[in-house]
Structure formats: structure tokens, C-alpha cells
Amino acid sequence: MSHLYTTRVTAVGGRNGTIKSEDGILNLQLAMPKELGGKGGATNPEQLFAAGYAACFENAVIHVTRGQSDKVRDNAIEVVGEVGLLPNGAGGFNLAVTLYVEIAGLDQAKAEEIVRAAHAVCPYSNAIHGNVDVKINGTQNGDAEGVNRVLLEQQICFRVYVASNLVTRLYRLHLDAMGLTYPQYLVMLILWETELQSVSQLGDRLYLDSGTLTPLLKRLEAAGLVVRRRDTIDERRVLIALTETGRALRERADAMLRALEGETCLLPGDLDVLGEQLDRYIWDLSAQLGTQGRVDAPPVD
């Protein structure tokens, strides 16, 4: 079967290179996103894929309604393409795609029917069928971006909350044998790093107020892991130091962390990327909320 249209684009230099179409209309610099450890400042393959899929899907909606009483015109539809890059657990990567489709002037049931029909004819949908996880949200009345934001799956806070709970549960399986709760373990990590700390210093590092931190420290002291004493220079300051028992526990923590390396469901390189992304997010959010300085600044690219 002959092609209806064929184009060729040359890429040179990978994710930090250039792309150019044979007719010269497309001529762009590429840059690795900051979230992946790059410098950003230019487009990337995921953005280009999202743009191409969104535009193609919008035209597919217009195509499947052509000649119908519910014909959709190009000024009555908006498609937002969202493309995510994620590890596949085997050393490679997959794409996850979500399309947010808003069609004006139609009831929800009819809009969803049209979206399903468009998904069946869109060449992007057909090209990645069975290989890429594609979610399509069709709405009659979305917001300005065509995105229904009042959904649990759209809440970044929920994702962070669930991930935090799961990671804490994973650590707790090992910490119970050490006689530590997860917050107590975080305090011990700081003291193993720098043994003598004031209560306020610990609170700043852990984002805990004194009302939460004080009883936690009392329990660690009762367990014989730390001692509290007044600063000889400023008696208003309470200093926390490790006992010999507390210092000895560090070896068990090291063994625990080695065991956890194979239980995080992330490859070492993926773990580093996620850590850098979270560092930047914590830093930016801290600055916005006026708590900047409690965490170290992320590295500058």
C-alpha cells in the first residue's frame, strides 16, 4: 500500500543534539530535561511526542465526526498530551501517555463515544498499540487546559503520600529488629553523621517541631541510644549525643541499607535520578513556603 505522506527527520547528538527535517522547516536544538539530570532550556523527544500525538488525535476526532450531525470543528476541541518516561525494571525505559480531550457542546456520553472512535483511527494510537500505556480522559467541560484536575490520580500530594507510606513500611520491616521507629531512625542517621546536635538543628533537618521531636528524643534516651545535656556555653540549648550503644547500632544500619538496595524496585541509576528530582522539589517547595535553609541546596547544573 502506498504511503499517503512520508517525511524524514535527522537527529544528530542524541538528547543534547539537534533535529532537522529534510525540508528544513523543522530545525531544533534538543536538551536533556533538568529532571533527568540535564540542563534543560530546549525541547526534548517527550515534548515532541506529546505535541505530535495531541495534534494527531485532535484531527482524528474531527475525522470521525465528519459528515455527522455532531461534527466537531477544530475550534471546539482541545487536546493536551502528557508523556512520561519511566524505568521498565529491566534496565530500559517505557513511555506512559495520557491524553486529556475536551470537546465543547457535547454531552459526556457522546464525547466519550467520539474519543473512543478517534483512538481507533489515530495513527499514533495504532502505532503504539500494545507497547505504550495510553490513558484517554474525555471531558465535556474541562478547565482552560482541558484537564479535570479534581481527580485523585491528578494529585501529586497523593502520589507522594502513597510512596512515602510504602517506603516507610519497607524500612519498618528491618527497623523493628533494631528496636527503632522510622522517625527515630532518621534522628540516628543525623547523629551518626555529626554526633553532637542541638534539638533545633535536628528539627530543622527533619522538618519536625520541638513538640514532636522532644518525646521522640526522650524515648531514644530511655532506650540508651542517646543522652541529652545542656550546652556549657549556652545553657538554653539542649545538645544530643550518642551513647556507645547508639554508635554501635550504626553497623546494623549499614547492613540493613545493603539489604534494602535490592528491595526498592529501582535500579541504582534510576534511584539517583529520583533522588535528584526529589531534592530539587523539596528545595523549591521549601523556598516557596519560607522554610528554605532546612535542606541543602540542590547541585547547580
Image: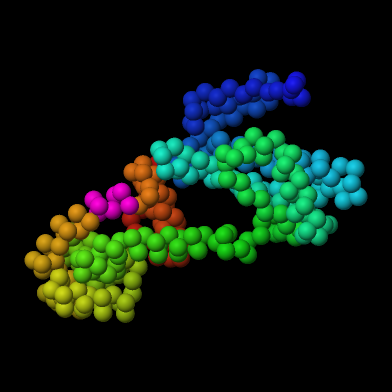
117 and 223: which is toward the camera: 117
Question: 8 and 280: which one is in front?
Answer: 8
Q: Along the horizontal axis of the image, is 16 left or right of 203? A: right
On the image, the x and y values in percent for residue 193 come to 20, 58
Residue at the spot x=26%, y=79% of the render?
215
Query: Is 256 placed above or below 8 here?
Result: below
Q: Is residue 25 magenta?
A: no
Is residue 182 toward the left or the right of residue 192 in the image?
A: right
Q: Position of residue 226 (x, y in %)?
A: 15, 71
| Magenta range | 257-263
- The outermost residue toward the left is 244
* Location of the N terminus (image quadrant): top right
Decide: is 50 above or below 102: above
User: Quadrant of the image for the C terminus?
Assistant: top left
Nearer to me, 88 or 223? 88
As displayed, is residue 84 above or below residue 242? above
Q: Give the percent coordinates (x, y) of residue 179.
A: 21, 69
Which colour scheme appears in the figure? rainbow
Residue at (64, 46) in percent of width and height:
81
On the image, the x and y values in percent for residue 240 come to: 17, 71
Asked if one can make out residue 85 in the rendered structure from this viewpoint, the answer is yes
Is 61 left or right of 124, judged from the image as shown? right
Which residue is rendered at x = 29% and y = 63% of the image? Answer: 173
Can residue 47 be seen here? The reply is: no
Instruction: Name the quadrant containing residue 63.
Output: top right
Residue drawn at x 63%, y 39% as measured from the top left: 129
